[in-house]
């Protein structure tokens, strides 16, 4: 079903809600030159498993990639400079505060490598984004995982602080906020209080991959610390709000001394020509983030309404995905969803009674909702 078909059916009105939210989203997309119909996978499935932006590259970014292809035989220096300038203006920092990487994951890897040391505590929540513990495996870290709080599923700052500072050794503390896979947030004031008091030997790695989706007043960026605190690194990405997950472009923001240390571990000649071109064009598109948030909110409403209808508990979300409880075996549920053409999130122990579903286009979320209703009729959830 194409977007126009989706919004002209009765199902669309029921899924997206009252008024013409579905029509507004469809009109927004259809009236933006360069954005075509939603793309299913080769087997006809919809992918709601990896927290990707369903809009894909903006039309401007797509055209920039096409225009840059003739220069793909060149090293990316001529494309890197405009990107750094645009990113500096966009974030509101100097270029010496910025470090570029192949997605935010390379920035995280650089930080883990730069601040390693024998038995250095690497303190993370559980569950959280798994790449940071993965990057420490060949290094001499001591991994310390601290369960999220029982109420609110926030980072347990008290226990994390004890783990980081109790040994009186240099430590690296990883905050994914909003957290993946829970989409929950940790109160920024509580984090700020720790940063303000912490010794400079406690390095804070602040992963803000989903920063642009969060609207809770108790949440804000850690960006304010970078000029006065060399032990704070803010990590962001073009993968989510800008729809560039496949292009691999991310950036770190830090004190100039910290940024210089991280660059010792950077892959040279990054980013590639096409990613740099797409990134520069995306930053110049003033309405791109608002369009991404609007589509995200429409699909989020479908998920929340469906879970409310079926009486399924779900976590509050400040990202482009949500965790909801299921009844029955999680692995079986994931496989059944795949069998009906809907790919949902993998298992995230210890939350083995919860499933993470990413927010796609409204019609994609509608397929998920109908599958879930059918599962309820069969007594599976």
Image (tube, rainbow, N blue to C red):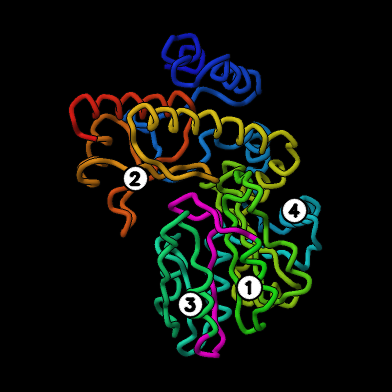
Q: Which residue is drawn at 60% across and 61% down?
A: 101
Tag 3–tag 1 contact (CB < 8 Å): no
Whole-Å distance between the Cαs marked 3 and 1? 16 Å
Q: Which of 274 and 6 is in front in this view?
A: 6
Q: Which mark is first along the chain, 4 or 2?
A: 4
Instruction: Residue 322: say if magenta.
Output: no
Whole-Å distance between the Cαs marked 2 and 3? 27 Å
Whole-Å distance between the Cαs marked 3 and 4? 30 Å
Q: Give the range drawn in magenta.
A: 166-188
* Mark 2 neighbour density, 10 Å: few (under 14) some (14–19) many (20 or more): many
Indicate the secondary structure of the residue bearing disc 4. helix
Indicate the secondary structure of the residue bearing disc 2. strand
Q: Nearer the viewer, residue 282 or 78?
A: 282
Instruction: Residue 184: say if magenta.
Output: yes
Indicate the secondary structure of the residue bearing disc 3. strand
Q: Which mark is first along the chain, 4 or 3?
A: 4
Indicate the secondary structure of the residue bearing disc 1. helix
**Residue 333, position in %: x, y?**
24, 40
Return the residue at label 3.
122
Tag 2–tag 3 contact (CB < 8 Å): no
Vertically, is 249 above or below 130?
above
Vertically, is 142 above or below 339?
below
Return the residue at label 4.
87
Return the residue at label 1.
194
Return the residue at label 2.
355
Q: Residue at x 54, y 54 (%)?
A: 185
Q: Which residue is drawn at 57% across and 53% down?
A: 209
Whole-Å distance between the Cαs marked 2 and 4? 35 Å
């Amino acid at each position: 079903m194409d977007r126009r078909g989706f919004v002209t059916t009765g199902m669309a009105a029921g899924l997206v809600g009252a008024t013409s939210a579905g029509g507004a989203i469809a009109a927004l997309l259809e009236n933006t030159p360069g954005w075509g119909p939603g793309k299913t996978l080769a087997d006809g499935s919809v992918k709601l498993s990896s927290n990707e932006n369903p809009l894909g590259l903006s039309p401007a970014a797509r055209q920039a990639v096409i225009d840059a292809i003739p220069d793909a035989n060149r090293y990316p220096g001529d494309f890197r400079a405009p990107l750094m300038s645009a990113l500096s203006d966009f974030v509101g920092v100097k270029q010496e505060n910025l470090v570029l990487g192949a997605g935010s994951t390379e920035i995280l890897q650089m930080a883990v490598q730069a601040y390693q040391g024998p038995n250095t505590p690497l303190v993370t929540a559980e569950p959280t984004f798994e790449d940071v513990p993965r990057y420490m495996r060949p290094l001499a870290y001591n991994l310390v995982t601290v369960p999220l709080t029982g109420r609110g599923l926030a980072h347990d700052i008290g226990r994390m602080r004890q783990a980081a500072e109790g040994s009186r050794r240099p430590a690296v503390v990883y905050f994914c906020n909003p957290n993946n896979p829970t989409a929950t947030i940790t109160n920024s004031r509580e984090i700020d209080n720790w940063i303000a008091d912490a010794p400079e030997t406690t390095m804070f790695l602040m992963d803000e991959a989903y920063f642009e989706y969060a609207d809770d007043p108790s949440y804000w960026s850690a960006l304010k610390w970078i000029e006065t605190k060399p032990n704070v690194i803010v990590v962001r990405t073009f993968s989510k709000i800008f729809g560039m997950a496949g292009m691999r472009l991310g950036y770190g923001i830090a004190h100039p001394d910290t940024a210089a240390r991280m660059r010792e571990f950077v892959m040279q000649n990054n980013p590639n020509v096409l990613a740099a071109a797409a990134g520069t064009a995306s930053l110049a598109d003033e309405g791109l983030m608002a369009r991404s948030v609007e589509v995200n909110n429409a699909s989020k409403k479908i998920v929340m309404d469906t879970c409310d209808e079926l009486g399924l508990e779900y976590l509050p979300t400040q990202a482009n995905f949500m965790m909801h409880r299921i009844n029955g075996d999680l692995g079986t549920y994931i496989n059944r969803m795949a069998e009906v053409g809907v790919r949902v999130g993998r298992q995230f122990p210890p939350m083995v009674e919860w499933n993470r579903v990413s927010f796609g286009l409204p019609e994609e979320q509608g397929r998920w909702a109908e599958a879930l209703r059918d599962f309820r009729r069969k007594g599976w959830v």
